[in-house]
Amino acid sequence: MRRKITVKGFASITWLGLMLLLTFYPLFFLLNVSFKDIGQYTQGMLAITFPLHFENYGMAANMLKDYTLNSIIITVASLAGLLLTASLTAFVLARYSFPGRNIIFYGLIGLMMIPSVLTLIPSYILTIQIKIYNTHWAVILPYIAGGQAFNVFVLRTFFQGLPEELFEAARIDGASPLQMYGRIALPLSTPILSTLAIMHVLGSWNDYIWPATVLQSDILRTVAVGLVYLNRIGSFPDPGPSMAGSVLASIPLLLLFVLSMRTFMQGLLTGALKI
């Protein structure tokens, strides 16, 4: 028996269809223009034209290879430093009692309430004072420091939920605090660490404001900054290679999410981010 579509149901379907169109239209525009030359783009940027200019991707890959390498270096280094320091801090705050523990934790929560744009100028001045301006460290160290509050907050909540019996048995066997951290806490926290890692990679790979502020040399620019820079120089006026570069810059993130989607969902479903 067929169910009749009510006016409310029709309105909901129409609204969802409109939202779907608005969501996927920019992706269609991006892919469509990436295969055009300047003449095809001028004649009709919305029309699907032939022949398809696959050489746009070769040009974009050649121009972005150094920027992509910089992004990989910054993302991997900041991710390793962030997860190591945040997990150690969260483990100590969760499993050990000492004077001022709650003050430190509430102070970290307070830092989460400060908009990141307010720290832009102080961080910029600090990079100049410690003489790391216009180096990769000017991006890596602020990424590590800036992600501490949220990561420590989430990991502390997770570590507190681990059974005390596991750590008590380890103490009886003579395990040191670092051994309990490395052999008990970290293996059990793989799903939440993977989730936090994906979130950090997405944020650092797509970040534009901070790398554009502290990286002035062209050889140091990240891929997000490089894409904008390529649109400004006279030797790269064609929108086709520019859009192709945007497609290529998105591929690593898409592959990361596809390959780690199961772990990412597991980290969410285990309640690790239930704060």
Image (tube, grey):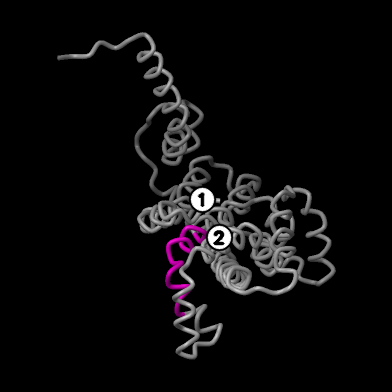
The label number, if any, that marks residue 157 in the structure image? 2
Q: Is residue 8 left or right of residue 134?
A: left
In this view of the protein, which residue sits in the foreground, 234 or 262?
262
**Location of residue 255 with respect to 246 vertically, above or below:** below
Q: Determine if the magenta segment contains residue 211.
A: no
Q: Which residue is mark 1?
A: 274
The mark nearer the N terminus, 2 or 1, is 2
Instruction: Give the residue type at disc 2.
Output: Thr
Determine which quarter of the picture holds residue 153: bottom right
Badge 2 vs badge 1, beta-carbon distance below 8 Å: yes
Q: Kindly give the residue lying farthest to the top in the view shown.
A: 7
Instruction: Give the residue type at disc 1.
Output: Lys
**Gap between marks 2 and 1, in whole Å?**
9 Å
Q: Residue 264: x and y, percent?
A: 42, 55
Q: Determine if the magenta segment contains residue 196.
A: yes
Which residue shows up at 50% across the image and 63% down it?
Answer: 161
Q: Look at the image and give the residue range highlighted in magenta.
A: 183-197
